[in-house]
Image: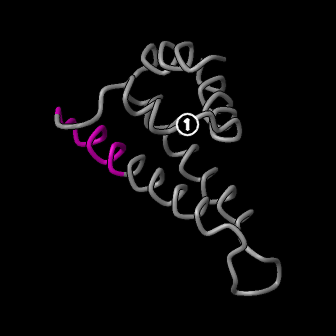
Amino acid sequence: MTPDELVAAFSSLSATDQWRVLAEYAHGLTVIARGTYVPQTEDVADPRRLRMLNEVQHRVIGHLQKLISGSAERYSDDAIVRIIIGEDDAELLTLLETAVKRRR
């Protein structure tokens, strides 16, 4: 899917399905973040990517909290999807696409 198609697909979901997508995506981010570690050590091989993934995780969880509480002070569907997929990050795009397709 293109980013625009993902925005449309995410926007078409019910609030409950958006929660599910965001929760699944947030879990998937933790798995991707593990790829930044140096195996069998406490070191980080790619600190820049780990930092970026942590920031995306922060925004996703914050948006999820506001969505669940019904707060209008949250990102638009367009904005959260574009935050989620990053700047041309195929791995993040695929992660979101997979989560959205499970709800359609």
Q: Is residue 37 above or below residue 83?
A: below
**Residue at the disc numbered 1:** 87
Image quadrant where one finds the N terminus: top right
Asked if residue 10 is among those painted magenta in the image, a careful observer would answer: no
Q: Residue furthest bottom?
A: 41
- Report the front residue among 93 and 66: 93
x and y, in percent, of residue 2 in the image: 62, 17
Residue 50 in which image quadrant: bottom right
Which contiguous range is marked in magenta?
A: 62-72
Amino acid carrying mark 1 in the image: Glu
Residue at the image point whose x is 42% and y is 17% from the top: 11
Q: Residues within 10 Å of mark 1 (few under 14, many from 20)?
A: few
x and y, in percent, of residue 89 in the image: 64, 38
Q: Is residue 31 above or below residue 72?
A: below
Image quadrant where one finds the C terminus: top right
Dot 1: element = loop
Asked if residue 69 is among those painted magenta in the image, a careful observer would answer: yes
Residue 66 in which image quadrant: top left
x and y, in percent, of residue 15 in the image: 37, 27
